[in-house]
Amino acid sequence: MDSPVGIADVVFEKMAWSMKTVKNSTPFNCKNIRLISGRCSPDYSYGITDPHDDIQKTGRAVLGIWNERVNIAQDNYSTVRTSVLVRSNDLLSYCLFEEENHRYRTNDYYWEVNANGNLIGKSLETNEVCFTWQPHGSQFTIHTKVPENAVRFEIQQPPLLTKENILDTIHFDKSWVRIIQY
């Protein structure tokens, strides 16, 4: 079975997860993150050749593509979730959470063009930015709040391995290598 792009990365029995990793300098303190959620081409799916001609129509089309992917996933799996790992730049601090994948009501959002020429979808209720869609490349991003109950953890920096440690561990023997000079 084909996997809906960006929705069913990991499948176990009748459950599916989209797996996302995000870099953040302070994962314990971050409140919002951006999840790249796949490519959405309103030209291919809806015949919209100029996305800036009617940005409300384009925004609704982008959400329509996402919603259809969610529909396909939910038709095939009883549980469809996104698992998010926010990691620090030094790979020592992490924040982990899951959320249910769901459809978005297209009439709950309005669309604007930002300084980069991207479309941003804002909530009619809160005026918060909820989505970004980049016409060049058709990348769709969902702005997500990090829940307070997210699991936050640290790992210790493992000791550095030296070349000598590695060679000793594998019981390296110089006879394994023969140097040939031409």
Image: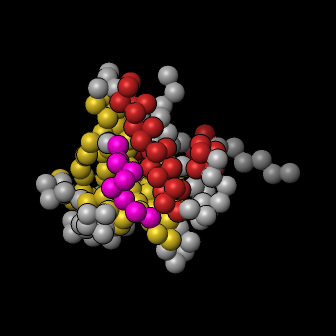
Q: Quadrant of residue 69?
A: top left
The type of colouring in the image is: secondary structure
Residue 179 x %, y %: 72, 48
Q: Residue at x 61, y 64 (%)?
A: 53
Q: Residue furthest right?
A: 182
Tally of numbered discs: 0
Q: Is residue 107 magenta?
A: yes
Residue 136 x %, y %: 62, 62
Q: Residue furthest bottom?
A: 115
- Seen from the viewer's position, the closer of residues 125 and 167 is 125
The boundaries of the magenta stretch are 103-111
Q: Quadrant of residue 147?
A: bottom left
Reply above or below: 5 against 116.
above
Q: Quadrant of residue 19?
A: top left
Q: Residue at x 44, y 64 (%)?
A: 111
Q: Is residue 150 left or right of residue 112?
A: left
Residue 121 x %, y %: 41, 62
Residue 33 x %, y %: 33, 62
Q: Residue furthest left?
A: 149
Is residue 98 visible in the rendered structure shown here?
yes
Q: Is residue 45 left or right of residue 96?
A: right
Q: Residue at x 51, y 49 (%)?
A: 61
- Seen from the viewer's position, the closer of residues 92 and 168 is 92
Is residue 91 visible in the rendered structure shown here?
no
Q: Residue at x 47, y 35 (%)?
A: 4
Q: Is residue 161 magenta?
A: no
Reply above or below: 98 against 147.
above
Q: Is residue 141 left or right of residue 180?
A: left
